[in-house]
Image (tube, grey):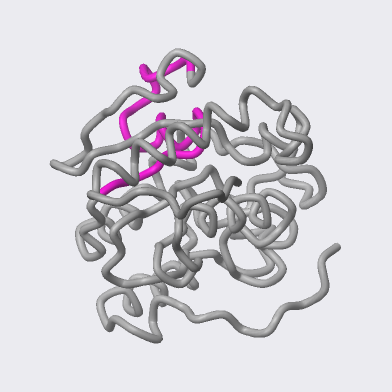
């Protein structure tokens, strides 16, 4: 388990509308995940980001600290963001669901959220996106794509690298960092999935008129 980190900037530190949503989330009981959570995870980052990252849901470390993407997958995502030329604070990072889903709701082993859990939680994300107005969304994994576009959107391998649109915002589907870790992470330079994701990140940068810093990689 990761050590308890210092409190990172929260949405309510910078934007009153995001603060109101985060407060609602903290008391939400719209699905059974409220019974096993330690903390809600509304998401955090720049309230006016060029790029927003959306994942599946909180894991153990996120549930403990109330921050999105701070475990091993989050550390990989942080390296990806840095390689794109941003500190984490300049993007916004969130999830489809704001509480940790676990097998049998026992609070032990993570699982993807159910369609019912996503339906209960997704209005919060929709409201956040409307406030944040990112230029580009990077959807991390199949669950993020399904949460945004519906259960019919299946096959992240096929969708990855193909531009979609959500409420007029360009969306790049790509693999989740946890999948990259299972394939070997970002060490050694031999993980094909890793370079596929990096290509998607570069495409997102080009969409907003940027290039990655020279001689850097995720």
Instruction: Kindly identify the residue that appears in the image at 25 percent across and 56 percent down.
Output: 134
> For this view, does 72 lie left or right of residue 196?
right
Is 139 covered by the magenta stretch? yes
Stretch in magenta: 136-155
Q: As displayed, is residue 191 above or below residue 34?
A: above
Q: As displayed, is residue 84 above or below residue 145?
A: below
Counting from the top left corner in percent of width and height, residue 140 is at: 49, 39
Q: Quadrant of the N terminus?
A: bottom right
Counting from the top left corner in percent of width and height, residue 41 is at: 54, 64
Quadrant of the image occupied by residue 63: bottom right
Counting from the top left corner in percent of width and height, residue 210 is at: 30, 51
Counting from the top left corner in percent of width and height, residue 82 is at: 54, 59
Quadrant of the image occupied by residue 6: bottom right
Q: As displayed, is residue 154 above or below residue 10?
A: above
Is 63 covered by the magenta stretch? no
Q: In the image as oriented, which residue stretches furthest toward the front?
A: 215
Q: In the image as oriented, which residue stretches furthest toward the right?
A: 1
Instruction: Kindly identify the residue that appears in the image at 67 percent across and 32 percent down.
Output: 179
> For this view, does 26 lie left or right of residue 165?
right
Instruction: Kindly identify the residue that appears in the image at 43 percent across and 33 percent down.
Output: 200
Q: Nearer the viewer, residue 206 or 20?
A: 206
Q: Nearer the viewer, residue 55 or 109?
A: 55
> For this view, does 201 lie left or right of residue 41?
left
> For this view, does 4 lie left or right of residue 28?
right
Q: Nearer the viewer, residue 153 or 136?
A: 136
């Amino acid at each position: 388990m990761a050590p308890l980190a210092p409190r990172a900037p929260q949405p309510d530190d910078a934007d009153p509308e995001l603060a109101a949503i985060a407060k609602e989330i903290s008391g939400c009981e719209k699905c059974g995940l409220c019974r096993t959570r330690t903390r809600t995870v509304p998401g955090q980052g720049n309230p006016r980001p060029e790029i927003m990252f959306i994942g599946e849901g909180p894991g153990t470390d996120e549930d403990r600290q109330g921050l999105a993407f701070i475990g091993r997958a989050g550390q990989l995502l942080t390296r990806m963001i840095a390689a794109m030329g941003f500190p984490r604070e300049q993007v916004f990072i969130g999830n489809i669901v704001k509480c940790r889903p676990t097998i049998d709701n026992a609070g032990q082993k993570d699982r993807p959220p159910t369609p019912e859990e996503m339906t209960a939680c997704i209005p919060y994300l929709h409201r956040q996106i409307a406030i944040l107005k990112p230029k580009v969304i990077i959807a991390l994994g199949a669950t993020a794509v399904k949460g945004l576009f519906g259960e019919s959107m299946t096959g992240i391998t096929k969708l990855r690298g193909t531009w979609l649109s959500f409420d007029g915002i360009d969306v790049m589907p790509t693999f989740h960092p946890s999948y990259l870790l299972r394939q070997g992470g970002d060490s050694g330079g031999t993980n094909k999935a890793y370079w596929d994701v990096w290509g998607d990140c570069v495409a997102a940068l080009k969409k907003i008129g940027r290039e990655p810093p020279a001689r850097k990689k995720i």
